[in-house]
């Protein structure tokens, strides 16, 4: 598992007996000093909840931690079911995974926060905002997956839609695909590869760690993306920022455009030259937007 940048790693037990692992950087000025029983209050550092991509461990990797700390933000992240430290939940929806995050935040005593997600984390950030609208100050989805709208256009522009197409046939088909699937190099642009060698190098290492214990998390993520999420985009009432690369070959820009038309308070930042990974370099300015929006 990727090393958490400051803070602590903890776990809660859900009513069904499942363990759920979480990561918490604590206040930027004293990261790592938080007591397991300490709860946030109104004077604590503002909180952003980070929803990890597919596959990852959920750990708060260096570029996320650094960008947040520079803005005085505390980061909490939760490993979705099936990823290291969080027990699998077969048949989970996007809303089910978001409910685990709500339980963690309740355990930590965190009432108000912004919610952000990248790639496969995007749907979960949106779902959380729909489930707890009174608690969410702002939402950001970077290169996020849109709900499956039921035709071939949903896949258009994807360099390798094989896993998501297999998920349409059910869990057994998606699991079988995972056993033989290999990464398609054309999924990433030159900018993506440059980003992975530079400021977001930790992302690649964490993705490998996220898949190291098996394919359950990734399989169940894809199944959740192509089946009803359990929430509607129209239920998201907080200001919502969609950040999208125009050259994304993993989740094409049509997904952001489709969601923009269905969000009540949506805003789209289209970065025409960026791909699926390089668009993450917009995180610092997206966090500036979160800070400005949350204090209005």
Image (cartoon, grey):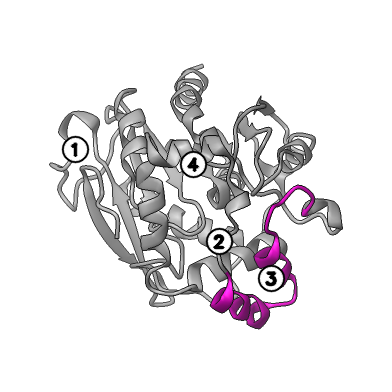
Residue 160 part of the magenta-drawn span = yes
User: On screen, 272 above or below 249?
Assistant: above
Q: Position of residue 269 (x, y in %)?
A: 64, 25
In this view, the residue in front, 187 or 104, is 187
Task: Identify the residue at horizontal 57%, vertical 63% (top origin).
Answer: 221
User: On screen, 114 above or below 128?
Assistant: above
Instruction: Classify mark 2: residues with Cα within 10 Å, few (<14), some (14-19) or many (20+).
Output: few
For the record, the magenta segment spans: 155-181
Which numbered disc flags the more N-terminal residue, 4 or 2?
Answer: 2
Which image quarter: residue 213? bottom left
Measure the C-alpha gap from mark 4 to mark 2: 13 Å
The reply to whether discs 4 and 2 touch (Cβ–Cβ < 8 Å) is no
Helix, strand or loop for disc 4: helix
**Residue 111 seen in the figure:** no
Which numbered disc flags the more N-terminal residue, 4 or 3?
Answer: 3
Q: Position of residue 67 (x, y in %)?
A: 36, 29
Disc 2: which residue: 183
Disc 1: which residue: 31
Which numbered disc flags the more N-terminal residue, 4 or 1?
Answer: 1
Measure the C-alpha gap from mark 3 to mark 1: 40 Å
Measure the C-alpha gap from mark 2 to mark 1: 36 Å
Q: Position of residue 117 (x, y in %)?
A: 52, 43
Instruction: Classify mark 3: residues with Cα within 10 Å, few (<14), some (14-19) or many (20+).
Output: many
Disc 3: which residue: 167
On screen, residue 241 versus residue 42, left or right, reads: right
Instruction: Classify mark 4: residues with Cα within 10 Å, few (<14), some (14-19) or many (20+).
Output: some
Which numbered disc flags the more N-terminal residue, 2 or 3?
Answer: 3
Q: Nearer the viewer, mark 4 or mark 1?
A: 4
Instruction: Classify mark 1: residues with Cα within 10 Å, few (<14), some (14-19) or many (20+).
Output: some
Task: Identify the residue at horizontal 48%, vertical 59% (top origin).
Answer: 55
């Amino acid at each position: 598992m990727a090393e958490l940048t400051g803070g602590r790693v903890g776990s809660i037990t859900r009513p069904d007996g499942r363990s759920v692992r979480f990561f918490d950087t604590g206040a930027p000025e004293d990261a790592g000093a938080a007591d397991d029983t300490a709860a946030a209050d109104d004077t604590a550092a503002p909180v952003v909840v980070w929803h990890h991509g597919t596959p990852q461990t959920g750990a708060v990797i260096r570029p996320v931690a650094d960008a947040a700390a520079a803005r005085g933000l505390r980061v909490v992240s939760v490993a979705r079911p099936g990823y290291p430290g969080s027990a699998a939940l077969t048949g989970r929806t996007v809303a089910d995974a978001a409910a685990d995050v709500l339980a963690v935040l309740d355990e930590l005593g965190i009432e108000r926060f912004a919610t952000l997600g990248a790639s496969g984390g995007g749907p979960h950030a949106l779902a959380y905002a729909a489930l707890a609208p009174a608690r969410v100050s702002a939402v950001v989805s970077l290169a996020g997956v849109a709900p499956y709208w039921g035709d071939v256009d949903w896949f258009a522009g994807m360099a390798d839609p094989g896993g998501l197409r297999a998920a349409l046939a059910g869990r057994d088909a998606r699991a079988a695909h995972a056993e033989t699937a290999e990464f398609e190099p054309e999924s990433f642009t030159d900018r993506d590869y440059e980003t992975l060698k530079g400021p977001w190098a930790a992302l690649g290492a964490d993705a490998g760690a996220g898949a190291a214990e098996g394919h359950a998390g990734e399989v169940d993520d894809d199944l959740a993306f192509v089946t009803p999420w359990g929430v509607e985009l129209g239920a998201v009432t907080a200001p919502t920022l969609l950040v999208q690369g125009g050259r994304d070959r993993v989740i094409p820009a049509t997904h952001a455009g489709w969601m923009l038309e269905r969000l009540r308070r949506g805003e789209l930042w289209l970065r025409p030259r960026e791909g699926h990974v390089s668009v993450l370099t917009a995180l610092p300015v997206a966090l500036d937007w979160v800070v400005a929006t949350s204090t209005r």
